[in-house]
Image (cartoon, helix red, strand yellow):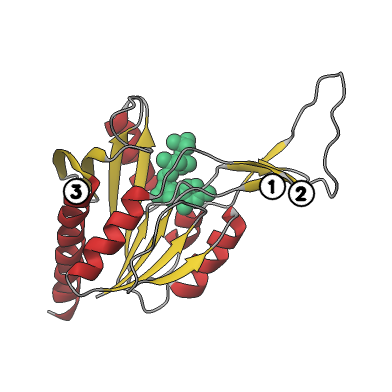
Amino acid sequence: MRFLITAGPTREPIDPVRYISNRSSGKMGYAIAEAAIEVGHDVVLISGPVNLDPPPAAKLISVSTSDEMFDAVHRHVANRDVLIMCAAVADYKPAKVSKHKIKQRDEKLSLELTPTRDILASLAKQDRQVLVVGFAAETENLQENAQNKLRAKNCDIVVANDVSGSDSGMESEENEVTIFFRSGEIKEISRASKKIIARELVKLFANMRENCLTKKMS
Ligand code: CTP
């Protein structure tokens, strides 16, 4: 199958030397890319700036801003079977990017932020063949928030993890996830290395995509 996977954070520039970003390490997305390749899937990996070596067999597309990630996803989504939006795309970006380095002054400085374009939501209205998997990083009300995202962004699956502790989710080597399906079904994968979780997720996504195809053909 043909997988399109996004990973890592985005960087939203403030001026030529500063940006807004988040703590995403990219480890989960890269582990999913590796696990997919291990079992013979074709992988395009769209990655924000991370300190990781991409799996050599993946086609790597490096991006920095949410706008670049938006364009890259739209360029590559056609003819893909599974889209996994694991990237922690910034929700806001500076309303204006200063051309010159902002100078230090002895006074308050406010930064006006404007919402970025939501990549998942932008695919919602398309007549699509691709299985769309969203990720939800939550610090509270995990089930309610994840199920709201599933509906609002018209995903087939949302993989949610609690990022309130330091031992799972962002930057960590381990994770534990709850998977929400459009049917209302819920599945849990208990704490394990991101590598183990990634293998489980890849199996699950490939099966789900296979079932969609079989249903459409019959
Ligand atoms: N996402 C996206 N485009 C954005 C922001 C997020 O496609 N501009 C995707 C992420 O890749 C992820 C999902 O939306 O698959 C959920 O991201 P998350 O940050 O948890 O949720 P938000 O919708 O941004 O909501 P909030 O930050 O309020 O929880």
Circle on res. 104: none
Query: Which quadrant holds residue 46?
Result: bottom left
In the rendered image, residue 8, in percent from the top left (x then y), is placed at 45, 50
In front here: 55 or 165?
Answer: 55
Helix or strand or loop: what does disc 2 sit on? loop
Mark 1 surroundings: few (<14), some (14-19) or many (≥20) residues within 10 A: some
Residue under label 2: 16
Pick whichever of labels 1 and 3 is earlier in the sequence: 1
Can you tell which of label 2 and label 3 is closer to the viewer?
Answer: 2
Residue under label 1: 13
Q: Residue at x 64, y 47 (%)?
A: 12
Q: Residue at x 30, y 48 (%)?
A: 158
Quarter of the picture holding the C terminus: bottom left
Q: Is mark 3 within 8 Å of ligand 1?
A: no
Quarter of the picture holding the N terminus: bottom left
**Amino acid identity at mark 1:** Pro
Q: Is residue 166 above or below residue 121?
A: above
Helix or strand or loop: what does disc 1 sit on? strand
Q: Is residue 31 above or below residue 75?
A: above
**Residue 155 in view here:** no
In front here: 70 or 65?
Answer: 65
**Residue 160 in view here:** yes
In the rendered image, residue 162, in percent from the top left (x then y), is placed at 31, 31
Helix or strand or loop: what does disc 3 sit on? helix
In the rendered image, residue 121, in percent from the top left (x then y), is placed at 47, 54
Residue under label 3: 197
